[in-house]
Amino acid sequence: MFYYSGKTIKEIAEKLECSNGKVKVTLHRVRKLIKKNLEDGGYGYGK
């Protein structure tokens, strides 16, 4: 929702009925996972 729909963290939290902190943590974890998957697939700095 953050990237695809352009919704704010506050809007996402309200829609999912959770805290802003939970949305932020989830976004951080997903970004980290995407980065790892890209690096494992041959994408990344210095490769």
Image: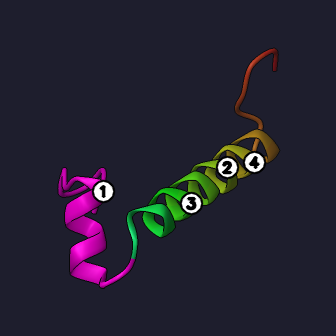
Structural crowding at the residue carrying mark 3, measured as other residues with C-alpha within 10 Å and reported as few (<14), some (14–19) or many (≥20): few
Secondary structure under tag 2 reads helix
| Residue stretch in magenta | 1-18
Seen from the viewer's position, the closer of residues 40 and 10 is 10
Which residue in the protein does label 3 denote?
Answer: 25
Q: Earlier in the sequence, mark 1 or mark 2?
A: 1
Q: Could you tell me residue 36's position as x and y percent? A: 75, 48
From this view, report whether residue 24 is shown above or below residue 39. Answer: below
Q: Could you tell me residue 13's position as x and y percent? A: 30, 71
Q: Residue furthest top?
A: 46
Query: Which mark's residue is nearer the viewer, 1 or 4?
Result: 1
Q: Earlier in the sequence, mark 1 or mark 4?
A: 1
Distance of mark 3 from mark 1, alpha carbons?
11 Å
Q: Is residue 17 magenta?
A: yes
User: What quarter of the picture does the C terminus occupy?
Assistant: top right
Query: Which mark's residue is nearer the viewer, 2 or 4?
Result: 2
Structural crowding at the residue carrying mark 4, measured as other residues with C-alpha within 10 Å and reported as few (<14), some (14–19) or many (≥20): few
Q: Amino acid at mark 3?
A: Val
Q: Amino acid at mark 4?
A: Lys
Distance of mark 1 from mark 4, alpha carbons?
23 Å
Q: Could you tell me residue 22's position as x and y percent? A: 49, 69
Q: Of the numbered discs in the image, which one, if any, rests on residue 36?
A: 4
Q: Of the numbered discs in the image, which one, if any, rests on residue 9?
A: 1
Q: Earlier in the sequence, mark 3 or mark 1?
A: 1
Q: Amino acid at mark 2?
A: Lys
User: What quarter of the picture does the N terminus occupy?
Assistant: bottom left
Distance of mark 2 from mark 4, alpha carbons?
6 Å
Which residue in the protein does label 2 denote?
Answer: 32
From this view, report whether residue 45 is shown above or below residue 27. Answer: above
Position of residue 19 in the picture relative to residue 34 (left or right): left
The answer to whether marks 1 and 4 mark residues whose Cβ atoms lie closer than 8 Å is no
Structural crowding at the residue carrying mark 2, measured as other residues with C-alpha within 10 Å and reported as few (<14), some (14–19) or many (≥20): few
